[in-house]
Image (cartoon, rainbow, N blue to C red):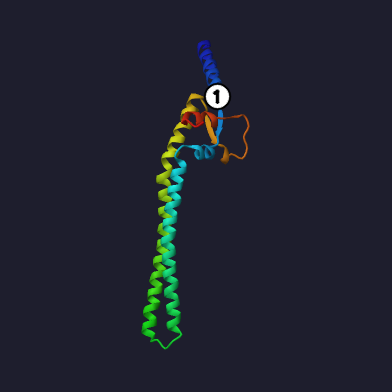
Amino acid sequence: MKRILTICIIAVCCITAGYAQKAKFGHVDYGAIMKEMPGIDTAQQALVEYQQELEAVGKQMADEFKAKQTEYANLANTTTSSAILKVKEDELTKLYTRIQDFVSSSEMDIQNKQIELLKPFQDKLMDAIKKVAEAGKYTYIFDITMCAYHTDTEDITAAVKNELGIK
């Protein structure tokens, strides 16, 4: 009986000691590191250029729509037949629908391009954070921009930059 009691006490002490270990928290400025990563500015510039290309196409479509709208308005003020006006009206409707579809697909294309261009940088940064966290035996690492309040955490931003080779 004493033996069982001793084993239970030892087990409780071991379990309690495991829970008594204090978790180690750290924080990192994810956005600041991303801005400093080599090559990120090139990726962001490529994204801006891609957006500008799509905007130029959208502007051409909008200009074409305005021209057709003006043409329709001019025809409506004359003695043009209703059949011709109907054809022009249908053209305007189709062009407007095409513009709406283009805007929707452009938004998706921009998001996909952003993922394509920035994902390698994000993956590299997350790998560096993971390495620093494992080396420092951190339980949690928080992004400082997402944390409203923190105390008793260590800033590992410099260590992550060092891991990435950023000076």
Front residue of 5 and 97 = 97
Give left or right: position of 142 versus 43.
right
Q: Secondary structure at mark 1?
A: helix
Q: Quadrant of residue 87?
A: bottom left
* Residue pointed to by mark 1: 19
Does residue 70 lie above or below 80 as drawn?
above
Residue 107 at what x, y percent from top left? 44, 56
How many marks overall? 1
- Residue occupying the point 53% across, 13% down: 6
Of all residues, the one furthest to the top in this rendering is: 2
> Is 108 rendered above or below residue 36?
below
Q: Residue at x 45, y 72 (%)?
A: 66
Tell me which amino acid carries mark 1: Tyr
Instruction: From this view, report whether residue 33 is shown above or below residue 45.
Output: above
Q: Point out the residue furthest to the bottom here.
A: 79
Residue shown at 40% from the left, 45% from the top: 116
Classed neighbour count for the residue bearing mark 1: other residues with Cα under 10 Å, few (<14), some (14–19), many (≥20): few
Q: Position of residue 108 (x, y in %)?
A: 41, 54
- Residue 121, given in percent of the width and then of the height, sits at 44, 39
Q: Residue at x 44, y 64 (%)?
A: 59
